[in-house]
Amino acid sequence: MGDRDLRGKPVADAILAEVKTAVADMADSGWVPKLVSITVGDVEAVDVYVRNQRRVAERVGIAFEERNFPGDVTQEEMEVAISTMNVDPRVTGIILQRPVPPQISIKALQSAVHPYKDVEGMNPTSIGNIVYNELDLAPCTAAASVELLKSTNLPLQGLEVVVIGHSEIVGKPIAFLLMAEGATVTVCHHMTRALSVHSRRADAVFVAVGKPKLVTADMIKPGAAVIDIGINALKDEKTGEETICGDVDYDGVSEVAGWVTPVPGGVGPVTVAILMRNTMIALQRQKNAYSSQFRSVATAE
Ligand SMILES: NC(=O)C1=CN([C@@H]2O[C@H](COP(=O)(O)OP(=O)(O)OC[C@H]3O[C@@H](n4cnc5c(N)ncnc54)[C@H](OP(=O)(O)O)[C@@H]3O)[C@@H](O)[C@H]2O)C=CC1
Ligand SMILES: Nc1nc(=O)c2c([nH]1)NC[C@@H]1CN(c3ccc(C(=O)N[C@@H](CCC(=O)O)C(=O)O)cc3)C=[N+]21
């Protein structure tokens, strides 16, 4: 690890310390969090994510259940399963891992997850809140990436930020979260004509594409912060060993950038921590809704 590394662990540990305290506080009033993690079929990057969710959930005291569905599951079967979890009072949060097989509509399933249990903030109702600057529960990787930028202490107001990738779950939510903080945001994608003209101007570059070494040193302004969200499988020709890398040419960029998040060891751990924090926010919302409903019933008598 280089001295310009923006490591995820310290940021994740600070978030998880707060989560652990929240779990203890809620347990005192009888509220116990449970996270259900839905996977469909079998995807390597998803396995890593779910494995780390389980490990961290156990560390902070959040009950964890993985629900894996076969790759040929039908849309209707998925919607029935989610409806059952929506009404199960023991389930606090539901996360639906991507990708899902082609016969499944991810958007329909995200809409099927009740907003109170939408710990990824991807129900259209939830993600709409980001436009209204209600940022407490946001898509995990986007929120994690912004937390990492904040840990540089760069002032966000007026900061020139370039986001490369405009997916609904990462690129776009990052742009909205940064706009809410007053940054000047440019979003690039495969139709952007001169990517490096934009990235070289930026004080901070976020990249979420899925292309190894897409971002090279000549594309980065000296001293800029580089947040690498990409996860790519790399097979070593000689040993055949498989490792992961991001979208950034780490060796070259870490000579120029002021900060660069390593992959692994950067955005990933913070994504997991944010998911745990979102689960506790969902539990608090459920508790508030329950209390106000029964308080009104109690006072109505
Ligand atoms: N660490 C974490 O927690 C997470 C990491 N990831 C990783 O982030 C990466 C992106 O995933 P995701 O956000 O789902 O994005 P998608 O895979 O859905 O889409 C890729 C995005 O990159 C854009 N793109 C493709 N080629 C280029 C290019 N040459 N220049 C600029 N933009 C380009 C695409 O634009 P267009 O649509 O116009 O083609 C699209 O917006 C993946 O590697 C994924 O594994 C994803 C989720 C969480
Ligand atoms: N709805 C949805 N939301 C996601 O956020 C989402 C998804 N689907 N599908 C899969 C991708 C991938 N993803 C990862 C998150 C953390 C690590 C992670 O913990 N990485 C660690 C550990 C890596 C390792 O253990 O080898 C690291 O980078 O240091 C990995 C992968 C989230 N994803």
Image: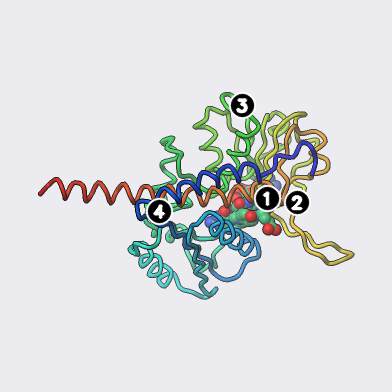
Q: CA distance from mark 2 to mark 1?
A: 8 Å
Left or right of 234 on screen, residue 230: left
Residue type at the position of mark 1:
Gly
The reply to whether discs 2 and 4 touch (Cβ–Cβ < 8 Å) is no
Q: Which residue is mark 1?
A: 230
**What SS does tag 1 mark?**
loop
Residue furthest to the right in view is 238
Residue type at the position of mark 3:
Leu
Q: Residues within 10 Å of mark 1 (few under 14, many from 20)?
A: many
**What SS does tag 3 mark?**
loop
Left or right of 32 on screen, residue 167: right
First reached walking from the N terminus: tag 2 or tag 4: 4
**What SS does tag 2 mark?**
loop
Q: What residue is rendered at 58% in x and 32% in y? A: 185
Q: Which residue is mark 2?
A: 212
Residue type at the position of mark 2:
Pro
Residue type at the position of mark 4:
Ala
Q: Residues within 10 Å of mark 2 (few under 14, many from 20)?
A: some
The reply to whether discs 2 and 1 touch (Cβ–Cβ < 8 Å) is yes
Q: CA distance from mark 2 to mark 4?
A: 44 Å
Residue situated in front as seen by the camera: 108 or 229: 229
**What SS does tag 4 mark?**
helix
Mark number for residue 1?
none
Q: Which residue is mark 3?
A: 159
First reached walking from the N terminus: tag 3 or tag 2: 3
Quarter of the N terminus within the rendering: top right
Residue furthest to the left in view is 301
Residue situated in front as seen by the camera: 7 or 167: 7
Q: Residues within 10 Å of mark 4 (few under 14, many from 20)?
A: few
Q: CA distance from mark 4 to mark 3?
A: 41 Å
Q: Which residue is mark 4?
A: 27
